[in-house]
Image (cartoon, rainbow, N blue to C red):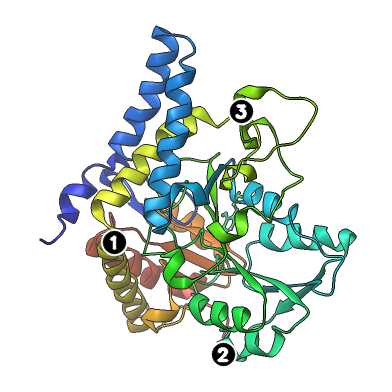
Amino acid sequence: MSTDFEALRRRFPVLERKTYLNSGSYCALADSVRDAFNAYMDERLAIGANWDVWVMKNEAVRTAMARVLRVTPDEIAVTASASAGINALASALDFTGPRKKVLISDFEFPTNAQIWHAQERLGAEVVHVPPAADGYIPLESFARQIDDRTQLVAVTQVCFRNGARLDIAGITRLAHERGARVMVDCYQAIGSMTVDARALDVDFAVGGMLKYLLGTAGIGFLYVRSELIRELVPSNTGWFAQQDIAAMDIRANRPSSSARRFEAGTPPVVNCFAAEAGLKIILETGTDAIGERVRALTRRCMEGLAGIGWPAVTPADDGRRGPMVAVPSSDAAGLFTRLMEQDIVTSFRDNNIRATVHFYNSEEDIDRFVAAMGANRARFGPRS
Ligand SMILES: Cc1ncc(COP(=O)(O)O)c(C=O)c1O
């Protein structure tokens, strides 16, 4: 049965007023996510503190997130952000042995570079893999750098600046052959396409709920492959990371036997309400169908931009592209404002305007964006 994307689109009221191409920054708000926020408020008014239900909400998010990543709930930590997940993981690693190297790419979101550089104090050596002449980072560039001194390859799946998608399965194959582990930062991909942690064979995955997972800021996840959980003891911890949260033991640290050991304090309760509702939409719609839709829309956008003589910097190859089309501009901030005035919501990083697409976008949204770009090309096009 084909998915009724038109009906789904009607569940996101902002789309009636805006051409919303900004899900890579923050998703459009769904009716059911707003209802979930309201349900939390209603409980606070009616009951005050409803802890038993709230803790179950955290578990519901864990279970739903596991389904999205196609793993088990025990392999998911629900965190306050992607950064919190990376920090918890980093705190469990040991850089005093022969494997000191952490390999990252030049496509990383800052947090996935800064946190690894922060480990240099503890012995880590951070090495960056740069793009090739065509702007992409091919597998061969990783192959040259992954060696028997590499402990971890911590790499983004989709670049937040240019929308390029890296070959995570290939990188993982190389890393495992050479005894290294892989953490993927899938924040710019998850929810917009299938991210199957087992098929990719990654050891760790991080992301959050405010973009393509349709939830809110203030909640994220860390996936840890089950076989690795017990050997990793994070020093970045807290009472909700303990095996028995109710024990209130102040004499010892007894981490949970599940990935919950990478959590810390009180769960972000209100965010759990919203995240659960967002994840439900993703699971009901299905990530395969979403991926296909997003691919077709980004392809339409790429072709439209090429047609007006203002090509994107995002790879044209469907397999090398995420849900983002990035377009170079001589004045990206000015173009962003100009598009806003026309009710076209985008974002910009460096010198690129980013149009980020979700399943709720339509062909008309894309055509409207391309037409507006055409009209603004003389003023904001790239410098020749
Ligand atoms: C690829 C990527 N990683 C990490 C982050 C940061 O996540 P957080 O603020 O939850 O730590 C972002 C945020 O935009 C991102 O795009």
Residue 136 position (above or below residue 98): below
Query: What amino acid is found at the position of numbered circle 1 in the picture?
Result: Ile
Q: Is residue 27 visible?
A: no
Q: Quadrant of ligand 1?
A: bottom right
Of residues 79 and 107, the one nearer the viewer is: 79
- The mark that comes first in sequence, 1 or 3, is 3
Few, some or many C-alpha atoms within 10 Å of disc 1 (few <14, some 14-19, many ≥20)? many
Q: Which residue is mark 1?
A: 290
Residue visible at 81% across and 71% down? 100
Q: Give the mark toward the camera: 1 or 3.
A: 3
Q: Which residue is mark 2?
A: 134
Residue 342, given in percent of the width and then of the height, sits at 37, 53
Question: Which numbered disc, 1 or 2, marks the residue that appears first in the sequence?
Answer: 2
Q: Is residue 223 above or below residue 220?
A: below
Q: Amino acid at mark 3?
A: Ile
Q: Secondary structure at mark 2?
A: loop
Q: Residue at x 40, y 83 (%)?
A: 316
